[in-house]
Image (cartoon, rainbow, N blue to C red):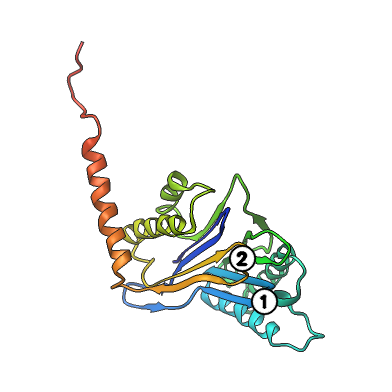
Protein backbone atom coordinates (compact mmCIF):
# COMPACT_ATOMS: atom_id res chain seq x y z
CA UNK A 1 0.00 0.00 0.00
CA UNK A 2 1.01 3.61 -0.33
CA UNK A 3 -0.22 7.13 0.28
CA UNK A 4 0.34 10.06 -2.07
CA UNK A 5 -1.28 13.51 -2.13
CA UNK A 6 -1.24 16.32 -4.66
CA UNK A 7 -2.71 19.65 -3.54
CA UNK A 8 -3.47 22.76 -5.59
CA UNK A 9 -3.49 26.17 -3.89
CA UNK A 10 -3.37 29.69 -5.30
CA UNK A 11 0.37 29.92 -4.81
CA UNK A 12 1.21 26.62 -6.49
CA UNK A 13 1.34 22.87 -5.89
CA UNK A 14 2.32 20.82 -2.84
CA UNK A 15 3.06 17.12 -3.31
CA UNK A 16 3.90 14.38 -0.82
CA UNK A 17 4.33 10.61 -0.98
CA UNK A 18 5.43 7.81 1.28
CA UNK A 19 8.03 5.25 0.16
CA UNK A 20 6.87 1.96 1.66
CA UNK A 21 6.10 -1.16 -0.34
CA UNK A 22 5.44 -4.51 1.27
CA UNK A 23 4.15 -8.00 0.60
CA UNK A 24 3.78 -9.02 4.22
CA UNK A 25 4.91 -7.74 7.60
CA UNK A 26 8.34 -9.33 7.15
CA UNK A 27 9.02 -8.06 3.63
CA UNK A 28 9.13 -4.26 3.66
CA UNK A 29 11.08 -2.19 1.16
CA UNK A 30 11.61 1.48 0.35
CA UNK A 31 10.88 2.68 -3.20
CA UNK A 32 10.57 6.23 -4.46
CA UNK A 33 7.08 7.10 -5.74
CA UNK A 34 7.66 10.74 -6.74
CA UNK A 35 9.41 11.59 -10.01
CA UNK A 36 9.99 14.97 -11.64
CA UNK A 37 11.23 16.43 -14.93
CA UNK A 38 11.79 20.05 -15.84
CA UNK A 39 12.97 22.48 -18.48
CA UNK A 40 14.38 25.48 -16.58
CA UNK A 41 12.22 28.56 -17.03
CA UNK A 42 9.70 26.69 -19.20
CA UNK A 43 8.06 23.75 -17.41
CA UNK A 44 8.10 21.33 -14.51
CA UNK A 45 6.14 18.06 -14.40
CA UNK A 46 5.92 15.69 -11.44
CA UNK A 47 4.19 12.33 -11.08
CA UNK A 48 3.20 10.39 -7.97
CA UNK A 49 2.50 6.67 -8.33
CA UNK A 50 0.49 4.06 -6.42
CA UNK A 51 -0.45 0.46 -7.11
CA UNK A 52 1.41 -2.41 -8.71
CA UNK A 53 5.07 -1.49 -8.43
CA UNK A 54 6.19 -3.24 -11.61
CA UNK A 55 3.55 -1.39 -13.63
CA UNK A 56 4.31 2.05 -12.22
CA UNK A 57 8.07 1.55 -12.56
CA UNK A 58 7.57 0.53 -16.18
CA UNK A 59 5.58 3.71 -16.88
CA UNK A 60 8.17 5.93 -15.19
CA UNK A 61 11.02 4.21 -17.05
CA UNK A 62 9.29 4.74 -20.39
CA UNK A 63 8.70 8.41 -19.58
CA UNK A 64 12.35 8.79 -18.61
CA UNK A 65 13.47 7.17 -21.86
CA UNK A 66 11.36 9.60 -23.86
CA UNK A 67 13.08 12.58 -22.26
CA UNK A 68 16.39 11.23 -23.57
CA UNK A 69 15.10 10.33 -27.04
CA UNK A 70 16.15 12.19 -30.22
CA UNK A 71 14.21 15.34 -31.07
CA UNK A 72 12.15 13.59 -33.73
CA UNK A 73 10.84 11.00 -31.25
CA UNK A 74 7.74 11.31 -29.06
CA UNK A 75 8.69 13.38 -26.02
CA UNK A 76 5.60 13.49 -23.84
CA UNK A 77 7.03 15.37 -20.88
CA UNK A 78 9.30 17.94 -22.45
CA UNK A 79 7.50 18.77 -25.70
CA UNK A 80 3.73 18.43 -25.13
CA UNK A 81 2.14 21.90 -25.46
CA UNK A 82 -0.27 21.56 -22.51
CA UNK A 83 -0.53 19.73 -19.20
CA UNK A 84 -3.82 18.28 -20.43
CA UNK A 85 -1.98 16.56 -23.25
CA UNK A 86 0.71 15.37 -20.85
CA UNK A 87 -1.96 13.76 -18.66
CA UNK A 88 -3.62 12.17 -21.69
CA UNK A 89 -0.36 10.67 -22.95
CA UNK A 90 0.57 9.30 -19.52
CA UNK A 91 -2.93 7.84 -19.21
CA UNK A 92 -2.55 5.98 -22.50
CA UNK A 93 0.85 4.71 -21.42
CA UNK A 94 -0.49 3.49 -18.07
CA UNK A 95 -3.43 1.72 -19.69
CA UNK A 96 -1.21 0.02 -22.27
CA UNK A 97 1.30 -1.07 -19.63
CA UNK A 98 -1.37 -2.64 -17.41
CA UNK A 99 -3.04 -4.35 -20.38
CA UNK A 100 0.28 -5.77 -21.57
CA UNK A 101 1.09 -7.21 -18.17
CA UNK A 102 -2.36 -8.73 -17.74
CA UNK A 103 -2.22 -10.32 -21.18
CA UNK A 104 1.22 -11.74 -20.46
CA UNK A 105 -0.03 -13.18 -17.18
CA UNK A 106 -3.00 -14.96 -18.77
CA UNK A 107 -6.65 -15.12 -17.76
CA UNK A 108 -5.87 -15.96 -14.12
CA UNK A 109 -3.88 -12.78 -13.81
CA UNK A 110 -6.65 -10.42 -14.85
CA UNK A 111 -7.39 -7.81 -12.24
CA UNK A 112 -4.08 -8.27 -10.42
CA UNK A 113 -2.29 -5.37 -12.06
CA UNK A 114 -3.68 -1.97 -11.19
CA UNK A 115 -2.12 1.43 -10.64
CA UNK A 116 -2.99 5.11 -10.50
CA UNK A 117 -0.94 8.25 -11.03
CA UNK A 118 -1.15 11.88 -9.95
CA UNK A 119 0.29 14.29 -12.52
CA UNK A 120 1.16 17.83 -11.42
CA UNK A 121 3.02 20.73 -12.97
CA UNK A 122 3.03 23.93 -14.93
CA UNK A 123 3.99 24.93 -18.46
CA UNK A 124 4.97 28.55 -19.17
CA UNK A 125 2.03 30.75 -20.11
CA UNK A 126 -0.49 28.44 -18.40
CA UNK A 127 -1.84 27.77 -14.93
CA UNK A 128 -0.47 25.13 -12.54
CA UNK A 129 -2.56 21.99 -13.08
CA UNK A 130 -3.21 18.75 -11.24
CA UNK A 131 -4.63 15.49 -12.64
CA UNK A 132 -5.59 12.07 -11.32
CA UNK A 133 -5.12 9.22 -13.81
CA UNK A 134 -7.04 5.98 -13.29
CA UNK A 135 -5.81 2.48 -14.28
CA UNK A 136 -8.08 2.59 -17.34
CA UNK A 137 -6.15 5.60 -18.62
CA UNK A 138 -8.93 8.16 -18.19
CA UNK A 139 -8.36 11.11 -15.85
CA UNK A 140 -9.91 14.05 -14.04
CA UNK A 141 -8.50 17.48 -13.22
CA UNK A 142 -8.43 19.29 -9.89
CA UNK A 143 -10.45 22.48 -9.60
CA UNK A 144 -12.32 24.61 -7.10
CA UNK A 145 -14.59 21.74 -6.03
CA UNK A 146 -11.83 19.12 -5.93
CA UNK A 147 -8.56 20.93 -5.11
CA UNK A 148 -6.55 17.87 -4.08
CA UNK A 149 -6.11 14.23 -5.08
CA UNK A 150 -5.10 11.22 -3.02
CA UNK A 151 -4.03 7.77 -4.18
CA UNK A 152 -3.35 4.63 -2.17
CA UNK A 153 -4.48 4.48 1.45
CA UNK A 154 -6.63 7.61 1.43
CA UNK A 155 -9.27 7.24 4.13
CA UNK A 156 -7.26 8.13 7.24
CA UNK A 157 -5.72 11.35 5.95
CA UNK A 158 -8.65 12.68 3.95
CA UNK A 159 -10.72 14.17 6.83
CA UNK A 160 -7.70 16.20 7.94
CA UNK A 161 -7.28 17.81 4.52
CA UNK A 162 -11.01 18.45 4.07
CA UNK A 163 -11.24 20.28 7.40
CA UNK A 164 -7.98 22.21 7.09
CA UNK A 165 -7.72 23.09 3.41
CA UNK A 166 -7.99 26.71 2.28
CA UNK A 167 -7.19 27.65 -1.32
CA UNK A 168 -5.54 30.90 -0.17
CA UNK A 169 -3.30 29.23 2.41
CA UNK A 170 0.45 29.69 2.18
CA UNK A 171 2.66 26.98 0.74
CA UNK A 172 4.16 26.51 4.20
CA UNK A 173 0.71 25.92 5.74
CA UNK A 174 -0.13 23.51 2.93
CA UNK A 175 2.99 21.51 3.80
CA UNK A 176 1.99 21.51 7.47
CA UNK A 177 -1.50 20.27 6.57
CA UNK A 178 -0.08 17.39 4.54
CA UNK A 179 2.30 16.54 7.40
CA UNK A 180 -0.70 16.11 9.71
CA UNK A 181 -2.56 14.08 7.08
CA UNK A 182 0.39 11.74 6.65
CA UNK A 183 0.95 11.43 10.40
CA UNK A 184 -2.68 10.34 10.86
CA UNK A 185 -2.28 7.78 8.09
CA UNK A 186 0.99 6.43 9.48
CA UNK A 187 -0.59 6.01 12.91
CA UNK A 188 -3.54 4.05 11.49
CA UNK A 189 -1.95 1.85 8.81
CA UNK A 190 1.40 0.05 8.93
CA UNK A 191 1.45 -0.36 5.16
CA UNK A 192 2.23 3.37 4.83
CA UNK A 193 5.62 4.37 6.20
CA UNK A 194 8.52 6.78 6.39
CA UNK A 195 10.55 8.19 4.79
CA UNK A 196 8.31 10.67 3.00
CA UNK A 197 9.11 12.69 -0.12
CA UNK A 198 7.98 16.32 -0.31
CA UNK A 199 7.99 18.74 -3.23
CA UNK A 200 6.66 22.30 -3.41
CA UNK A 201 6.18 23.93 -6.83
CA UNK A 202 5.63 27.68 -6.59
CA UNK A 203 3.49 29.25 -9.31
CA UNK A 204 5.42 30.61 -12.34
CA UNK A 205 8.85 29.45 -11.14
CA UNK A 206 8.93 26.20 -13.20
CA UNK A 207 11.12 24.49 -10.67
CA UNK A 208 10.90 22.84 -7.28
CA UNK A 209 10.79 25.69 -4.75
CA UNK A 210 11.39 23.17 -1.98
CA UNK A 211 12.21 19.45 -2.09
CA UNK A 212 13.27 17.09 0.68
CA UNK A 213 13.05 13.59 2.11
CA UNK A 214 11.54 13.32 5.59
CA UNK A 215 13.20 10.51 7.54
CA UNK A 216 12.25 8.81 10.81
CA UNK A 217 14.39 11.19 12.87
CA UNK A 218 13.16 14.40 11.20
CA UNK A 219 12.67 16.89 14.07
CA UNK A 220 9.89 18.89 12.41
CA UNK A 221 7.80 15.84 11.57
CA UNK A 222 8.28 14.51 15.09
CA UNK A 223 7.14 17.87 16.49
CA UNK A 224 4.06 17.85 14.23
CA UNK A 225 3.16 14.31 15.28
CA UNK A 226 3.56 15.01 18.99
CA UNK A 227 1.82 18.41 18.92
CA UNK A 228 -1.10 17.11 16.85
CA UNK A 229 -1.65 14.24 19.28
CA UNK A 230 -1.64 16.61 22.24
CA UNK A 231 -3.97 19.04 20.47
CA UNK A 232 -6.49 16.27 19.74
CA UNK A 233 -6.50 15.18 23.38
CA UNK A 234 -6.99 18.79 24.52
CA UNK A 235 -9.82 19.32 22.02
CA UNK A 236 -11.52 16.12 23.15
CA UNK A 237 -11.41 17.03 26.82
CA UNK A 238 -12.68 20.55 26.09
CA UNK A 239 -15.88 19.23 24.52
CA UNK A 240 -19.13 19.43 26.55
CA UNK A 241 -19.49 16.48 28.92
CA UNK A 242 -22.07 13.83 28.18
CA UNK A 243 -24.40 12.74 30.99
CA UNK A 244 -26.75 9.78 31.29
CA UNK A 245 -29.20 11.93 33.19
CA UNK A 246 -30.80 14.78 31.30
CA UNK A 247 -31.64 17.89 33.28
CA UNK A 248 -35.10 19.37 33.01
Q: Is residue 213 left or right of residue 36?
A: left
Residue 105 appears in the rendering: no
Q: Position of residue 191 (x, y in %)?
A: 38, 66
* Front residue of 18 and 171: 171
Residue 122 appears in the rendering: yes
Quarter of the figure that contains the C terminus: top left
Q: Residue at x 52, y 75 (%)?
A: 53
Q: Are marks 1 and 2 in contact (CB under 8 Å)?
A: no
- Tell which tag, 1 or 2, sits nearer the viewer: 2
Q: Residue at x 69, y 73 (%)?
A: 42
* Front residue of 15 and 115: 15
Q: Position of residue 64 (x, y in %)?
A: 64, 82
Q: Is residue 10 left or right of residue 175?
A: right
Category of crowding for the residue at label 1, using alpha-carbon neighbours closer than 10 angstroms: few (below 14), some (14–19), many (at least 20): few
Quarter of the figure that contains the N terminus: bottom left
Q: Residue at x 26, y 52 (%)?
A: 229
From what the image shows, is residue 136 above or below residue 62?
above
Residue bearing mark 1: 100
Q: Position of residue 173 (x, y in %)?
A: 43, 55
Q: Is residue 177 left or right of residue 41?
A: left
Category of crowding for the residue at label 2, using alpha-carbon neighbours closer than 10 angstroms: few (below 14), some (14–19), many (at least 20): many
Q: Position of residue 241 (x, y in %)?
A: 20, 29
Residue 126 figure quarter:
bottom right
What is the secondary structure assignment of the residue under circle 2? strand
From what the image shows, is residue 11 above or below residue 46?
above
Residue bearing mark 2: 119
What is the secondary structure assignment of the residue under circle 1? helix
Amino acid sequence: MTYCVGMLVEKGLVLMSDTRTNSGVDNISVFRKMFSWQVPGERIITVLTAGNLASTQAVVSLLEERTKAPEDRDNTLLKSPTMFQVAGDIGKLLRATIAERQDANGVRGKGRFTASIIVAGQIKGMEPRLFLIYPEGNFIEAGLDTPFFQIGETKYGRPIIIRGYDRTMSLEDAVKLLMVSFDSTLKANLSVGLPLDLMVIERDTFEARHERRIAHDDPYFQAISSSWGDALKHAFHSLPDYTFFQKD
